[in-house]
Image (cartoon, helix red, strand yellow):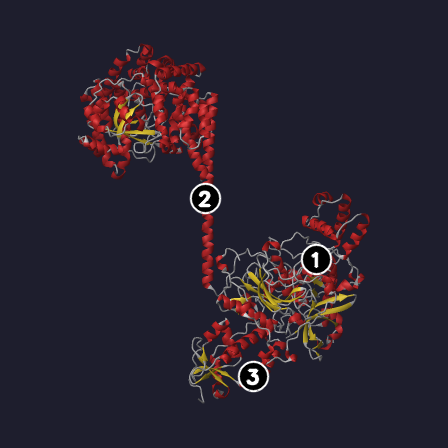
């Protein structure tokens, strides 16, 4: 049984979590960060084998301290970017922090314990505890030291003592944490490559700028503790309040706000409701600032050029990043088109979701990032977005596939779309003159614009491909057919290609994107 | 089917797959394992996340139930979704337009301030509003401007006052407030902005920096080899393009430098003119100090030799009196000689008939060459025309200097022969294509067939060809020819120079053969003035033609062309001053020399040189009507140069020739009594220089004798003491001395209008010359004439300048 004070970053322990069925569970979690507000400690936990979007700040009451595992020096972490064990010590890491510590004066009550990957730091400390990170006794001292350091580090970012304004303490601390974390994170990138399990993604070992094509990061070598933690507490967008799932690089000073206010139409961010109010007196947009290329009923699609309308594109990306883990905002939006799906009501065209698309894709990607905003999720909009993306590909006369990696939700959505689309075709095939209907994979691909590989993987996933009498056949079991029919009954939102007014541009013939 | 003894074929995407449904479905239990043959497609997810609990649960639920169960969905953070003040916030309604919304790209940027007021600002505003009215938007604009004007450094109040067009009190209030607020704010700006990348790369890994510009090296996919190849090709292309740009830049720079050089040269000449540095002493002094050669040498020469010669002689007598004298002289000349040449020039320049004058007018002037003038410079500058100096100085203006790496070719015999062989008049037609019957304006005589071309530096070179008809043609009255061909005649550039000689002109044995005339009627006559062919010197002033000295200057062995001999022979036959045998022997000797040289020469280049070979001939023969003198000296000089340059000189021969030449000349000289003193002095040292000097006077003619003689007198004392007794050199030098006095005369006249000429040159582009002629003619007709070649040269400069500016 460890004390609360001994809990450091990298520790693993069961954390109480309430599941969708309102049942209490104790999944194993890893402490990513610790902060202290008015003497009350909060722990940022990542539930292992759960998506990052469920990471949260918890109080010590929810921690099962009896089962705490302190980080091992070379511990393998189940999370791919797990900090413990994956980083060799770096002597320099301690230097900036301690340098910062000197000469800083901060009210003592602000006890902010901000630790990330303490074991590594401990290793790095000359004369520090060499390699007994597991013993609780050895943990104490580093903890103490680190506490002191963190307090100091906070000071530059939080000139106003946080205890005086408890409401704002939390965000302020948050920013302080990030400010500190950024430094080691940078180091980590170069340090971790050798042991990072995922290092095949960055096999060239060059931790420089990420690739310039695409919109998603498959190479997590740029990941650091800052980007692993949500930084925006809440976003207000039109009628909705959104709880971000992931880090998003909104201006750092805004990350301390309890609520970030976004203009529903231009997506500009403001620090307060008053600011938003003022903004709305000046902003007369009532729809995304692009050309409407599709309208059926209340659903419309707007096309926005990432080069021509930078500010909207950037604002959209910042918002989307809150919900897309692998999205990268490293580079500008120039090579992308943004297709924003809106729902119209008397107030205007409200953004429901969007997908971005490279103007020229070298890999047949027809979607870069795709997102249905949380308030609209699980209502078929995602599939509508996907369907629309394939409609565009059909107009272009190409097959396409979404950029990888897919998220869990992305995979489910795409699989569902592919399954339904392919099954629709297969079941629609009529036998001609008593012959058994047949179709090639290429034909399916052509009809649907779904890339061949995706067709095959879907057929496989649905277990439709079988080998029979020396040839491959497709088998549609009743189970499958029934399931499909039920699903299609629920799928009411469809894209009507007649309502699409879209002429593809040949971007390769343009000088710029 | 119990056991799989075969391997399933790979799934072929192009092969039709039969679809089995429901009851049709075969029993596949045995075949299940075969499915492995179908390659497993990756999900496209990251491995770590693929194993996530909720996803796996959802996937398996889907597999089992074929549809999503509510409890099996992947949980996401939930947030309340009802903002009750929404309607108050987003006021008004928006009616959906019937048409699809089409946005105008430029409507997006409105002038609204980016700064949005917050409640803190509102308090300030309320407070301020008690004293004065300030609207929120107004306030926002102020803050916006302040923010955007300041980076890390805040704008000062003074700057703020400039920035904000408001009441001072208000500015002060808002400014103070803004400074305070900004100090308290955590962000870098009151307008929250995405962190920008920094160029130093320090922000490469800053997670808060977003939307970096894609300027770095494009990364291609690792598995795309051809991408990389084409990328590299693009890089290479880019490199090469940038190299091309560099080259173009350098060319641009070079041409600019050239232009600058021209302007500098002009300036130098003007300066020198004003300084009276006609002899180039000042220039020399300056130049010796800096031992640089070409670049600095060129400016002086650019101005063509006219100036130089003038200067050289002038410095001997730098009194302005002479200038005036000459000026008056000019006037006199003008009276004496009606404006015929001038008129001709005007006519021809106005309407140059294309067939006859293919090359002359503009193109020749354009062919301005810097390097050629370098060569000129060398002999010119150190030689203030004193004969003895030159003798001592091997680099003297007239000395032959082999240029390193330069091969000198003998004239081609075959061509010369060819012309001799064609005895038929019909052959005149052939000749006509390249050579046309040519007359010189001054001295007025026909020189037979010649061709005019443009030499380096815009010099006009006459290539003469010798035919059997030469003796006849020589006798033709140029006036007669003019009668039918005048309008088509060429610009007489240098008529002014030769003016002085015109007094002498008298075509003595003119055989006006009407039959020949009628035959050649179709031929175009050109009134050219031959110029020095040699690259080396200062020619254009000397091109006044009748001086055999020019040929002396010629460095080339080719000067010893048979053709030249032939013409000179003709001349002799006319005047009877020199026996034919003498020339025959000489000619034979020269032919021998030529053959020896020919053996060494490459055949391919002969064609080029043949034209050059003809030049000396032209010069030699184009001398004025004082045929005997000029021809003598020409041949003598020729022999001399041949001796000097040819490997097999025969001294006695040369000497003999010269002697005959002297004799001849002496006879001629005697009449012009004014030059006797000169003659005697020069004779004291060596016979030939004196003779030549006298001869010069004679050639210069009656009109100019007055002032020429003083010039000669002054120049000769200096030169004579140093005179060498070597005959060949003497001849050589004589010729030079002949040249210079004449030039004195000419140049003194030409120098007067030169400022205007310079102006004209600079102003004038490549327009036709006639308009330019008129302004200068206002000064004086003769001056204009004198001035013309110079101006043309300048025009040439101007033209080249224009051309360079284009680049």
| Callout 2 touching callout 1 (CB < 8 Å) | no
Task: Tell me if A102 is positioned left or right of B206 in this view.
Answer: right
Say if A32 sits above or below B163 in the image: below
Q: Quadrant of residue B248?
A: top left
In x, y percent, where is residue B29? 49, 88
Q: Nearer the viewer, residue B592 or B188?
A: B188
Q: Quadrant of residue B346?
A: top left
Q: SS at mark 2? A: helix
The chain under label 2 reads B
Mark sitting earlier along the chain (1/3): 1
Marks 2 and 1 sit apart, C-alpha to C-alpha, by 53 Å
Tags 3 and 2 both on a single chain: no
Q: Quadrant of residue B432?
A: top left
Q: Nearer the viewer, residue B800 or A173?
A: B800
Q: SS at mark 3? A: helix
Residue, disc 1: A279
What residue appears at the point 34 percent right and 29 percent down from the top-left corner? B460
Q: SS at mark 1? A: helix
Residue, disc 2: B248
In x, y percent, where is residue B514? 20, 24
The quarter of the rendered structure image containing the C terminus of chain B is top left
């Amino acid at each position: 049984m460890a004390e609360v004070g001994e809990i450091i970053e990298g520790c693993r322990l069961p954390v109480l979590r309430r599941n969708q069925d309102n049942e209490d569970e104790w999944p194993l979690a890893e402490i990513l960060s610790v902060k202290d507000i008015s003497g009350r400690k909060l722990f940022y936990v990542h539930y292992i084998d759960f998506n990052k979007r469920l990471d949260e700040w918890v109080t010590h009451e929810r921690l099962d301290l009896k089962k705490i595992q302190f980080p091992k020096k070379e511990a393998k972490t189940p999370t791919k970017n797990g900090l413990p064990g994956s980083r060799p010590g770096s002597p320099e890491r301690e230097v900036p922090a301690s340098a910062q510590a000197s000469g800083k004066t901060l009210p003592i009550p602000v006890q902010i314990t901000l630790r990330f990957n303490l074991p590594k730091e401990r290793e790095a400390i000359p004369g520090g505890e060499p390699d007994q990170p597991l013993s609780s006794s050895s943990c104490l001292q580093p903890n103490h030291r680190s506490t002191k350091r963190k307090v100091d580090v906070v000071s530059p970012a939080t000139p106003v003592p946080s205890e005086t304004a408890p409401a704002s303490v939390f965000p302020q601390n948050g920013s302080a944490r990030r400010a500190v974390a950024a430094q080691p994170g940078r180091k980590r990138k170069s340090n971790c490559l050798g042991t990072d399990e995922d290092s095949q993604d960055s096999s060239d070992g060059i931790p420089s700028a990420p690739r310039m094509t695409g919109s998603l990061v498959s190479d997590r070598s740029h990941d650091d503790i800052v980007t692993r933690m949500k930084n925006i507490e809440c976003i207000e967008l039109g009628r909705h309040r959104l709880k971000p799932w992931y880090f998003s690089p909104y201006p750092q000073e805004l990350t301390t706000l309890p609520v970030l206010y976004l203009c529903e139409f231009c997506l500009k961010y403001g620090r307060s409701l008053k600011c938003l109010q003022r903004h709305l007196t000046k902003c007369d947009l009532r729809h995304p600032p692009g050309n409407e290329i599709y309208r059926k009923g209340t659903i419309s699609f707007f096309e926005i050029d990432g080069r021509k309308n930078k500010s909207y594109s950037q604002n959209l990306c910042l918002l989307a990043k809150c919900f897309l883990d692998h999205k990268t905002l490293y580079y500008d939006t120039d090579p992308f088109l943004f297709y924003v799906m809106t729902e119209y009501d008397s107030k205007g065209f409200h953004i429901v979701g969007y997908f971005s698309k490279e103007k020229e894709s070298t890999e047949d990607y027809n979607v870069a990032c795709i997102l249905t905003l949380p308030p609209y999720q699980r209502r078929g909009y995602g599939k509508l977005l996907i369907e629309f993306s394939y409609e565009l590909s059909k107009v272009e006369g190409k097959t396409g596939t979404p950029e990888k990696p897919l998220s869990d939700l992305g995979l489910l959505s795409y699989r569902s779309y592919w399954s339904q689309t392919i099954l629709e075709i297969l079941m629609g095939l009529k036998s001609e003159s008593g012959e058994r209907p047949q179709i090639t994979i290429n034909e399916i691909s052509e009809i649907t614009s779904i890339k061949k590989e995706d067709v095959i993987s879907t057929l496989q996933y649905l277990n439709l491909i079988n080998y029979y009498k020396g040839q491959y056949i497709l088998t549609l079991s009743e189970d499958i057919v029934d399931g499909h029919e039920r699903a299609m009954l629920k799928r009411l939102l469809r894209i009507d290609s007649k309502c699409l007014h879209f002429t593809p541009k040949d971007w390769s013939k343009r000088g710029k994107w | 089917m119990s056991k799989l003894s075969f391997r399933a074929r790979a799934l072929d995407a192009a092969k039709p797959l039969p679809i089995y449904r429901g009851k049709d479905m075969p029993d596949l239990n045995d075949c299940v394992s075969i499915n492995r043959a179908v390659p497993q497609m990756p999900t496209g997810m990251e491995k770590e996340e693929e194993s996530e609990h909720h996803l796996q649960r959802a996937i398996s639920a889907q597999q089992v139930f074929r549809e999503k169960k509510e409890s099996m969905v992947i949980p996401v953070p939930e947030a309340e979704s009802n903002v009750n003040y929404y309607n108050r916030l987003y006021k008004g309604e928006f009616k959906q337009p019937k048409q699809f919304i089409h946005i105008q790209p430029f409507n997006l940027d409105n002038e609204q301030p980016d700064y949005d007021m917050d409640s803190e600002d509102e308090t300030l505003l309320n407070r301020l509003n008690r004293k004065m009215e300030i609207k929120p938007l107004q306030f926002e604009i102020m803050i916006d401007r302040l923010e955007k004007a300041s980076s890390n450094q805040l704008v000062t109040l003074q700057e703020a006052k400039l920035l904000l067009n408001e009441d001072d009190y208000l500015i002060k209030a808002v400014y103070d407030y803004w400074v305070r607020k900004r100090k308290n704010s955590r962000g870098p700006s009151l307008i929250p902005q995405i962190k920008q990348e920094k160029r130093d790369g320090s922000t490469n890994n800053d997670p808060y920096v977003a939307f970096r510009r894609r300027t770095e090296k494009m990364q291609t996919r690792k598995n795309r080899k051809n991408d990389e190849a084409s990328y590299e090709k693009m890089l290479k292309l880019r490199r090469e393009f940038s190299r091309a740009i560099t080259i173009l830049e350098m060319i641009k720079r070079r041409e600019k430098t050239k232009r600058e050089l021209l302007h500098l040269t002009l300036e130098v000449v003007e300066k020198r003119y004003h300084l009276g540095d006609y002899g180039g002493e000042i220039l020399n002094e300056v130049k010796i100090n800096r031992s640089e050669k070409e670049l600095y040498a060129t400016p002086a020469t650019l101005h063509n030799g006219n100036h130089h010669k003038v200067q050289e002689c002038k410095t001997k007598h730098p009194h302005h009196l002479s200038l005036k004298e000459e000026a008056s002289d000019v006037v006199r000349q003008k009276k004496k000689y009606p404006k015929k040449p001038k008129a001709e020039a005007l006519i021809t320049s106005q309407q140059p008939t294309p067939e006859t004058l293919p090359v002359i007018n503009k193109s020749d002037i354009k062919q301005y060459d810097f390097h050629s003038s370098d060569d000129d410079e060398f002999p010119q500058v150190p030689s203030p025309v004193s004969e003895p100096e030159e003798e001592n100085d091997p680099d003297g203006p007239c000395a032959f200097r082999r240029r390193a790496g330069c091969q000198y070719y003998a004239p081609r015999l075959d061509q010369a022969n060819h012309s001799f062989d064609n005895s038929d008049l019909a052959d005149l037609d052939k000749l006509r294509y390249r050579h046309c019957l040519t007359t010189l304006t001054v001295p007025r005589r026909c020189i037979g067939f010649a061709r005019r071309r443009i030499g380096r530096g815009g010099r006009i070179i006459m290539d003469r060809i010798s035919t059997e008809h030469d003796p006849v043609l020589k006798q033709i009255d140029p006036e007669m020819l003019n009668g039918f061909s005048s309008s088509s005649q060429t610009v007489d550039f240098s008529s002014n120079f030769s003016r002085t000689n015109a007094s002498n002109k008298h075509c003595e044995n003119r055989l006006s053969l009407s039959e020949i005339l009628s035959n050649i009627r179709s031929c175009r006559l050109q009134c050219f003035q031959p110029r020095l062919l040699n690259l080396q010197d200062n020619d254009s002033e000397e091109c006044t033609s009748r001086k055999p000295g020019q040929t002396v200057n010629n460095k080339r062995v080719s000067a010893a062309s048979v053709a030249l001999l032939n013409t000179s022979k003709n001349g002799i036959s006319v005047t009877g001053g020199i026996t034919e045998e003498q020339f025959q022997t000489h000619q034979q000797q020269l032919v021998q020399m030529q053959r020896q040289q020919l053996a060494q020469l490459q055949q391919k280049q002969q064609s080029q040189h043949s034209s050059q070979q003809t030049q000396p001939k032209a010069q030699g023969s184009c001398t004025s009507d004082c045929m005997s003198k000029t021809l003598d000296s020409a041949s003598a000089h020729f022999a001399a140069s041949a001796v000097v340059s040819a490997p097999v000189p025969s001294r006695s021969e040369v000497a003999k020739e010269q002697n005959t030449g002297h004799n001849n000349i002496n006879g001629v000289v005697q009449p012009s009594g004014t030059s006797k003193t000169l003659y005697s002095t020069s004779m004291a040292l060596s016979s030939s220089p004196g003779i030549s000097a006298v001869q010069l006077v004679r050639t210069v003619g009656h009109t100019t004798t007055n002032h020429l003689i003083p010039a000669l007198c002054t120049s000769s004392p200096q030169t004579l003491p140093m005179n060498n007794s070597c005959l060949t050199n003497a001849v050589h030098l004589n010729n030079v001395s002949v040249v210079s006095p004449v030039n004195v005369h000419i140049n003194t006249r030409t120098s007067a209008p030169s400022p205007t000429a310079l102006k004209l040159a600079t102003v004038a582009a490549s327009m036709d010359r006639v308009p330019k002629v008129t302004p200068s003619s206002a000064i004086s007709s003769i001056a204009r004439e004198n001035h013309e070649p110079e101006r043309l040269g300048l025009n040439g400069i101007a033209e080249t300048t224009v051309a360079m500016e284009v680049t």
